[in-house]
Amino acid sequence: MFFFLSKILSFLLLPFTWAILLLLWSLFTKKEHIRKRALLAGVIVLYLFSNRFVLDTVMRAWEIPATAEPAAGSYDAIIVLGGTSAWDEQLDRVQFTRGGDRLFQGLQLLRKGVAPKLIFTGGSGSLKHPDKLEANWIQSWLVKAHLHDSAIVFENRSRNTHENAAFTKPLLGKANGRYLLITSGFHMRRSVACFAHEGVKVTPYAADRYSGGPMRYELDYLLLPEADVMQGWNQLLHEWFGCISYKISGYI
């Protein structure tokens, strides 16, 4: 029930949804003072949530900072969380998203000998296609790309971060080992907490960061709206909602 409810409520967290509802309210209300306020609020929401400087500032406070690459032999296993790709039904192939950085960083560290094993955890997070399992298509892609070997283990049942941690734990062998966790910077706080709840201590290794690079103080960066910035807010607000709902549910 939690899985299905979270998918439905996520729609209500989108800033674009708020803006559209406010603008529709201003269009259909018969009260002039409410119309003006709703219109102004809708415009403010659209502007603030499309401003890259605002997003970067908030992301820098929230994301777990990146760290230098660990030395060879530093860990017993590398854990890579799913959310790296989607399945392109039209072309019948993997389509990597910006979250693919999680997988590529993990593969690079594995090849450098940071750990003897990599665990990729990710099943289906889709209500429409519960049979489409990310771990399965990633494994197939690695085989076709001649990148797969016995050091890479796949967990394909998990549908969310809580299950990532719960279903990965039995694959580790021991809970008190040295484990490097790779996921997106904005997603790291909840991920570390989920593994801690399962009794597994992990070291965060943030990938796919929104706040990477130095801050800029140029006029276009500070003032001009950008449509793709809203996607960053979608991710962040979804993550905050996830943290609150996980806390209420006892997952962290």
Image (cartoon, rainbow, N blue to C red):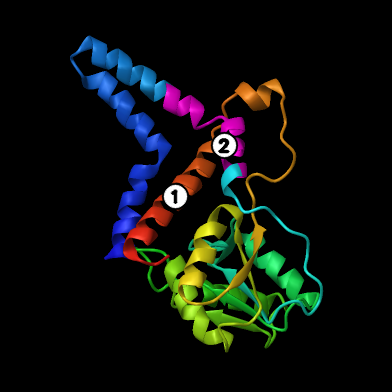
Q: In which quarter of the view is residue 118 placed?
A: bottom right
Q: In which quarter of the view is residue 54 placed?
A: top right
Closer to the camera in the image, 176 or 32: 176
Q: The C terminus is located in which quarter?
A: bottom left
Please state which amino acid type lies under the numbered disc 1.
Trp
Residue 151: x %, y % from top left? 68, 85
User: Residue drawn at (42%, 36%), measured in percent from left and top?
Assistant: 15
Q: Is mark 2 on a helix, strand or loop?
A: helix
In the rendered structure, which disc, 2 or 1, sits on the residue that comes first in sequence?
2
Residue 182: x %, y % from top left? 63, 66
Vertical position of residue 226 compared to residue 4: above or below = above
Q: In which quarter of the view is residue 131 placed?
A: bottom left
Residue 221: x %, y % from top left? 66, 27
Dot label at residue 240? 1
Res. 84 in view: yes
Specify whether residue 50 is painted magenta: yes
Residue 86: x %, y % from top left? 52, 62
Residues at discs 2 and 1 in contact (Cβ within 8 Å): no
Write down the region rendered in magenta. Answer: 44-60
Vertical position of residue 151 compared to residue 222: above or below = below
- Main SS, magenta region, reads helix
What residue is shown with label 2? 55
**Disc 1: CA contacts within 10 A as few (<14), some (14-19) or many (>=20):** some
**Disc 2: CA contacts within 10 A as few (<14), some (14-19) or many (>=20):** some
Please state which amino acid type lies under the numbered disc 2.
Leu
CA gap between label 2 and label 1 equals 14 Å
Q: What element carries label 1?
A: helix
User: Residue drawn at (35%, 57%), measured in percent from left and top?
Assistant: 245
